[in-house]
Image: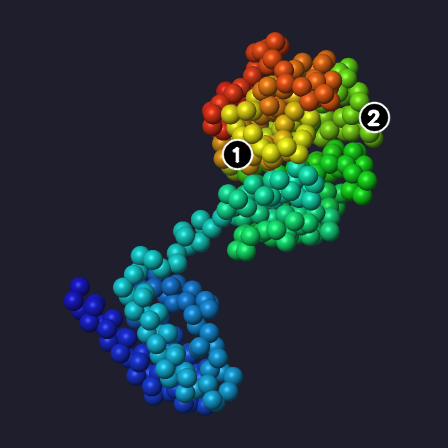
């Protein structure tokens, strides 16, 4: 109304007057307090939040400087009056743009990448940053090895996380929207038992305790087929395949028990287990080249960058990928487990239709690729 506009204009005038009268006062802190009292006694709550936000921003640096030396008080007469008046006018003219609780709640939470210095984990970090997603890159050292190549302004946080240390995992998972587990056994990182099994279980428990909506796990194809050549060869390295399937089974059980106990209560939490075939450092071929399968009967080769894309894109479609386990490979490298090891070593292309499991999935978009995946029993 006209009366309200008049009253608000009077407030702005009073702010200019108060600044002029007290700019040379020996107690500028009192001045700031008085100015806030004038504002807070006449403006509605949503405008007060806007002023509070402005006080915390860099635009109020002039006001903060007034308490340092008397020489700053003259600049304060010009700078502070303009700053405060601009803040007041902005809040009067644009109340809808005030910082609200709703806007604050929409602030993106980071996605955690566990094992960010691994060859697949680093690809996940790159994919997330390219998508302008906030990333919490974790490692045992707390440093992301490719940090120097990260573009300026990218939302990257580096944090210590050792999957054998539950406390460090809890800190890493707190306040996040998703966790991508891309860690695996290594000479310095730990044994398959400590990382691929117990470490994964530690992460899953931390995600559930912290109510993280989605956990994505990078596992391995052929992990359920101990008689296959791929399983037998890889299992020579610390029985890694045995430990991976134990870790997988524990994740499925933990989430099933949690969601059953929380039925009708807290929101449902979910997971996705991705089983890539032979991993390469080739450039990504994209979604149209990928084939998914379920049942662990078929595998092939896939670029680590494409695995990273699957990890991130699965987070966008939880209704399709939640509580699922699937294998992935380039469609033109797909083969039954009995022969896929040899074709991978020779880097041969295959006739993907020579062996059909009946559970293959293809698509030109990730949503189409994920559509129809069967939920874990």
Residue visible at 36% across and 74% down?
84
- Confirm whether residue 275 shows in the render: no
Q: Image quadrant for the N terminus?
A: bottom left
Q: Which residue is at a point 21% across and 67% down the rendered structure image?
A: 4
Left or right: 332 with respect to 224? left
Residue 175's x, y, as percent?
57, 49
Residue that numbered label 2 is attached to? 236
State whether residue 353 is above or below residue 215.
Answer: above
First reached walking from the N terminus: tag 2 or tag 1: 2
Residue 97 in sight in this render: yes
Q: Please determine whether, in this image, residue 197 is positioned above or below residue 158.
A: above
Looking at the image, which residue sits at the far left? 2
Going by the image, does 327 lie left or right of 362?
A: right
Q: Residue at x 41, y 84 (%)?
A: 75
Q: Distance between the residues labelled 2 and 1?
A: 32 Å
Q: Name the residue tied to disc 1.
A: 313
Q: Percent from the top left, x then y, of residue 236?
A: 83, 26
Q: Quadrant of residue 213?
A: top right
């Amino acid at each position: 109304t006209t009366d309200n506009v008049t009253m608000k204009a009077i407030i702005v005038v009073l702010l200019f007057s108060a600044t002029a009268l007290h700019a040379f006062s020996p107690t500028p802190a009192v001045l700031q307090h008085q100015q806030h009292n004038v504002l807070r006694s006449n403006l509605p709550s949503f405008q007060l939040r806007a002023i509070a936000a402005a006080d915390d921003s860099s635009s109020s640096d002039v006001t903060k400087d007034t308490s340092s030396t008397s020489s700053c008080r003259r600049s304060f007469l010009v700078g502070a009056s303009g700053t405060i008046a601009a803040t007041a006018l902005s809040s009067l003219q644009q109340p809808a743009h005030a910082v609200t609780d709703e806007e604050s709640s929409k602030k993106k939470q980071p996605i955690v990448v566990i094992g960010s210095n691994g060859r697949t984990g680093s690809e996940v970090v790159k994919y997330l940053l390219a998508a302008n997603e906030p990333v919490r890159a974790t490692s045992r050292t707390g440093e992301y090895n490719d940090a120097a190549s990260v573009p300026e302004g990218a939302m990257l946080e580096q944090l210590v996380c050792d999957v054998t240390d539950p406390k460090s995992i809890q800190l890493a998972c707190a306040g996040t929207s998703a966790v991508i587990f891309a860690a695996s056994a290594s000479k310095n990182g730990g044994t398959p038992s400590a990382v691929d099994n117990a470490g994964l279980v530690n992460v899953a428990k931390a995600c559930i305790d912290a109510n993280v909506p989605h956990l994505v796990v990078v596992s391995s194809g052929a992990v359920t087929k101990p008689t296959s050549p791929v399983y037998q060869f890889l299992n020579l390295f610390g029985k890694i395949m045995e430990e991976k399937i134990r870790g997988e089974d524990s994740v499925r059980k933990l989430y099933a028990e949690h969601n059953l106990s929380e039925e009708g209560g807290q929101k449902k939490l979910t997971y996705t287990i991705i089983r890539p075939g032979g991993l390469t450092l080739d450039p990504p071929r994209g979604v149209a080249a990928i084939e998914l399968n379920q049942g662990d009967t078929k595998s092939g080769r896939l670029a680590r960058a494409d695995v990273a894309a699957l990890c991130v894109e699965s987070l966008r479609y939880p209704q399709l990928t939640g509580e699922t386990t699937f294998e992935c490979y380039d469609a033109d490298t797909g083969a039954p487990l009995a022969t896929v090891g040899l074709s991978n070593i020779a880097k041969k292309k295959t006739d993907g239709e020579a062996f059909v499991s009946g559970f293959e999935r293809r698509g030109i978009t990730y949503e189409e690729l994920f559509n129809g995946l069967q939920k874990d029993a």
